[in-house]
Amino acid sequence: MADLTTDFVGIKSPNPFWLASAPPTDKEYNVRRAFEAGWGGVVWKTLGAEGPPVVNVNGPRYGAIWGADRRLLGLNNIELITDRPLEVNLEEMARVKADWPDRALVASIMVPCEEDAWKNILARVDETGADGIELNFGCPHGMAERGMGSAVGQVPEYIEMVTRWCKKYYDKPVIVKLTPNITDIRAPAQAAKNGGADAVSLINTINSITSVNLDTMSPEPSIDGKGSHGGYCGPAVKPIAMNMVAEIARDPATHGLPISGIGGITTWRDAAEFLSLGAGNVQVCTAAMTYGFRIVSEMKAGLSAWMDEKGYTSVDQVVGRAVPNVTDWQYLNLNYVTKARISQDDCIKCGRCFAACEDTSHQAIAMSADRTFTVIDEECVACNLCVDVCPVENCITMEELPKGAIDPRTGKKVGEYANWTTHPNNPGAVAAE
Amino acid sequence: MPDTMTPGIASGRLSADEIAENFADLHAPLDMHEARVAADRCYFCYDAPCVAACPTEIDIPLFIRQIAVGQPEAAGRTILEQNILGGMCARVCPTEDLCEGACVREAAEGKPVEIGRLQRHATDRVMARQGHPFARAASTGKRVAVVGAGPAGLACAHRLAMRGHDVVLYDAKDKPGGLNEFGIAAYKSTDDFAAREVDWLCQIGGIELKPGHALGREITLDGLTAAFDAVFLGVGLGGVNDLDAPGAERDGVMDAVGFIAALRQADDLTRLPVGRNVVVIGGGMTAVDAAVQSKLLGAENVTIAYRRGRDRMGASRYEQDLATSKGVRIICNAQPVAIHGNGAATEIELEYTTDDGAGLKGTGETLRLPADQVFKAIGQVLTHDGLALDGRKIAVTGAGRTSRDGVWAGGDCTPGEDLTVVAVAEGRDAAEDIHVTLMGVAVRATGAVIGEAARA
């Protein structure tokens, strides 16, 4: 059995699956249930400053989009940080941590951008025995209007400043949670690093409107006929999150900075992909909110079984393994030539590949009277659309043309590795060595 | 009180509750969520095989997509534009041989998209609305006689009315609907659906219904051609084949068609008599409908005896399985040679058969089954004459043109498969041809214009 224990910036947990700071981690009752179900750690729902807590709306907080059979694909929310008194949260955190010393317990914090505000709360959090803190610079709704959350995360200078305060007043690990609602994720990550952050976590939720009620003309979730953008999460955001994780992992300025990966992780495979792109652990929310805490059993068993199959004995052997293969477009091998191949044994003759190719691509699939679909190599640019629209997995595959073969489309021989930087059509090309 | 063991032919073998349960809707309608889940399975195939397999060429991927996106009434309209009896077809089509048999998910998983049930979901929604979804074109002043208010005649009449012609729709029976009304198992057309569908269809206007008018009795082809601009014959097959075996005249030997019609028209099925031991001769849908309904009425033993092999049965595999699931025994390769009894039938004698390619032969080995009721379901025949025939049916060319100018025909009285959906297609296409002939205008395509046709 592969060893799933992780040591993330010095915070140990029996597995890499943490619950993200969110509704599931808002109170002792839920967190105890999560630990009983086997979660490796939790990031407690974001604490605010002492005093009257924030309030939430009293109508619907969540909106959603669904796939077939109403399977939840994306969720958005307009819930704010914890609406319970700071004191209550701190007491509960201390009790839970005392009872579950082997699990990670991290406090998420969001207070105004004033040094004293941070200084005050950090001392209080430290008393709970929490293993570290996560700075919520990500929430895109409500708190941002008050100069917190993503309003901080969108200004690298603020990130660096607040991170620096936290490192000054707090001894344990400081994780900076980043908002994806920016143009380039590398700048805030660099700022966090410059401020002394031990790690970054990402992504927080994405600004979104999930749907519009066409009877009332109100965005959903609708509060008395009005809607506000919410934070989008769930399986739908995973590709965006993975790219951002990889961007930070491969940026020379932040390479090696520990990352806690977040964004639509629902299965062991999702987790393994995040780990491979440089995440040291993962945080989960929507999957738990959709199916309950029990899903962690599948995640742990699946990751462990896959690691055994591949011969990985510990999680850190997986972390970052795919990062060297994430590159810029300009370095992709233009002499890697593939052609679509349709398995006639597997084909069910739906014709979706034909419709996609004929209507929207390169007219590279032929259809016979008896509905046999074949690839026209002379036209196929290997775009992969047929593979993606085919309802039968592995029915259409991409076959690489060997070096030296003639590509029937171009009439040219498949050559050695060559990329755009040396391509004759590139005005900025450098002469090949 | 009679029960399933009561000898002879008796009514009231089952309680009213048991009868009600037995004759309930064979497939309960899909609710909104079930329909969306079922619709989500459709792959929206290119030039879809299901459309090619539908005699009326309903744009099935389109209507299923319309259900999936929450527009079941639009889906219903897509269906009804091609097939005005889409509601009945959703209930009675042998979908396993047509659209669902061609579904790529049948090939992929052995589980097709439930096209029939989705079609019913959509058409039910349209028909539940007040009013009729189609409007008539401006009046052409032309009058067309349609003879036979079954699926072919109804489809023809509706399309003609929609094109602005005035239609007089005759039917020999006192009630319209043809086989939809008289010839389909009750559990496929519950809640008087056939009659409701005719009423709904006629809401388009311009169709004057004249029941109790049989060709050759109250009306003649000569009289109609003289009085109308065109005539469409959708008269079906009015006669039944006789059983050629000693004892065929005994009491208890009857036509399956008549039994099914009586069953459909009965107000109280507990009062409809049925034998304790029922044998149905034949292998088509009529045989299955008679056998299954005999069983559902409380017959103790019901057997279908078919002279050829199982694969030659006219009833679809699904229908055969339905029969056996209800407790009907199917004996193949056995032909009736005598019906025994003392006055009334008590026993049937069957001889096993073999087919070596040169024709069916008796093997000499016989089998006797108790039989107090024997249903003949060995085919129906055309009763009309006066037009050129193709085999035993009215010969047609093109869209139902008969040997006589101004006379079209379609449905079971013309060659082709005897299916409701085929009759609808033929009636519709004949109507368009009549329209073109009368008006001298080009017809718009009646088939679903998709796939290669759209690219041409």
Image (tube, coloured by chain):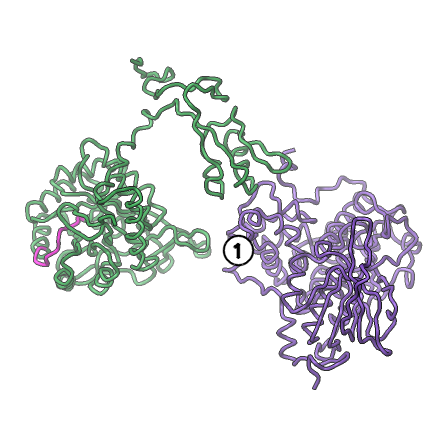
Chain colours: A green, B purple
Position of residue B12 measured from the top left corner of the image (x, y, whole percent): 71, 81
Residue A132 painted magenta = yes
Position of residue B42 measured from the top left corner of the image (x, y, whole percent): 54, 49
Q: Quadrant of residue B352?
A: bottom right
Q: Which residue is mark 1?
A: B38
User: Foreground: B116 or A125?
Assistant: B116
Residue B432 painted magenta = no
Label 1, residues with CA under 10 Å away: few <14, some 14-19, many ≥20: many
Circle 1 marks a residue in which chain?
Answer: B
- Report the number of numbered marks: 1
Q: Which residue sits at x=87%, y=78%?
A: B343
Position of residue A131 measured from the top left corner of the image (x, y, whole percent): 13, 53
Residue farthest toward the bottom in the current orientation of the protein:
B1
Residue B174 appears left or right of B72: right
Query: Which quadrant, please, contains the C terminus of chain A?
Result: top left
Q: Quadrant of residue B215?
A: bottom right
Q: Which residue sits at x=47%, y=27%?
A: A381
Residue A340 appears left or right of B244: left
User: Foreground: A65 or A315?
Assistant: A315
User: Foreground: B122 or B92?
Assistant: B92
**Kind of residue sitting beneath label 1:** Ala
Secondary structure type for disc 1: helix
Measured along the vertical axis of the image, is residue B389 above or below residue A341?
below
User: Foreground: A228 or A204?
Assistant: A204
Residue stretch in magenta: A126-135
Position of residue A412 measured from the top left corner of the image (x, y, whole percent): 46, 17
